[in-house]
Image (cartoon, rainbow, N blue to C red):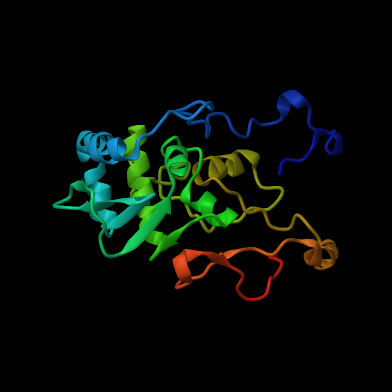
Amino acid sequence: MWTPASSNPGIAPSDRPTLIARMTVDRRIRVDGELAATEPAEFFEVTLPNLFAQAHDRLRPSLRELAPRPLTITVGNRSWSLRVDDVRVAVSAVSTAGTVLRVDAEQLASLIADKVTPMGWLTTGTLDMGGHLSDILNWWLILRAALDGTTPHRTGAVEFKDRNGGQLDLSRSFAPDDPADEMAWFLEQAGFLHIKGLYREDEMAAISTEMDVAAPLLRWRRTLVVGQPQGRIARVGADAAIR
């Protein structure tokens, strides 16, 4: 949202503030390539229990906070369940009542390698499940942490500070001519920036009209319907452009 040089010739390049100096989202922990061969029984009965045991101290606070309900993962004609037993993850070769995620061996290998995610399957209409999506997403956080050697995010783990060390007001908005360093601090802390008054009402009305013209050409969004057989994807309700 910084004014381009071509439209603001009064500020020399050397005088323009550096808005972001330290922020990065680069957290790559793997490389793209061929999937490693995965034998489902060995993964669920040997590899995964060992990973959960090694990650116990890291996972314990998140297991208390999330309190995930049992999840059954079915691969072909075999099933394994994940459950929390005394703040420890237990993996057993049985199915349990509750949410079920159904995958084939190739999907399991892709899931382990982080080539796909449950939400990716959801948006492409290939998520095969029964029960609650939230159960799958909670276990996804725990599973990824065990596989990647990371710690799941917990409520309150991230603090947003203002420039004086106090709590950042996340509802704050800025005017276009507010100091750039203040906006930069807020953006680096919060990850977003709300600037008021950038467009006139007639400009926004023109954009709204263009959205109405384009809306019929857009593909409808797909929504997970709770209670649909096998958690399939179906169309629900009317589409609406988000303004």
Q: Where does the image place residue 226, in percent across and percent down from the top left?
A: 46, 71
Farthest-out residue, bottom: 237
Q: How many numbered tags mark residues here?
A: 0
Q: Where does the image place residue 131, in percent across and percent down from the top left?
A: 38, 66
Between 71 and 188, which is closer to the camera in this rendering?
71
Q: Where does the image place residue 2, in percent across and percent down from the top left?
A: 72, 40
Between 165 and 23, which is closer to the camera in this rendering?
23
Answer above or below: position of 219 versus 87: below
The quarter of the rendered structure image containing the N terminus is: top right
**On the picture, is 190 further left or further right than 198?**
left
Residue 147 placement: quadrant: top left
Answer above or below: position of 218 versus 182: below
Residue 177 makes an appearance in the image: yes
**On the picture, is 8 further left or further right than 29?**
right
Between 165 and 7, which is closer to the camera in this rendering?
7
Farthest-out residue, front: 77
Residue 150 makes an appearance in the image: no
Residue 55 placement: quadrant: top left
Residue under the image location 41 percent in, 38 percent down: 112
Farthest-out residue, left: 86
Between 140 and 125, which is closer to the camera in this rendering?
125
Answer above or below: position of 212 versus 86: below
The quarter of the rendered structure image containing the C terminus is: bottom right
Residue under the image location 53 percent in, 49 percent down: 120
**On the picture, is 32 further left or further right than 17?**
left
Residue under the image location 57 percent in, 29 percent down: 21
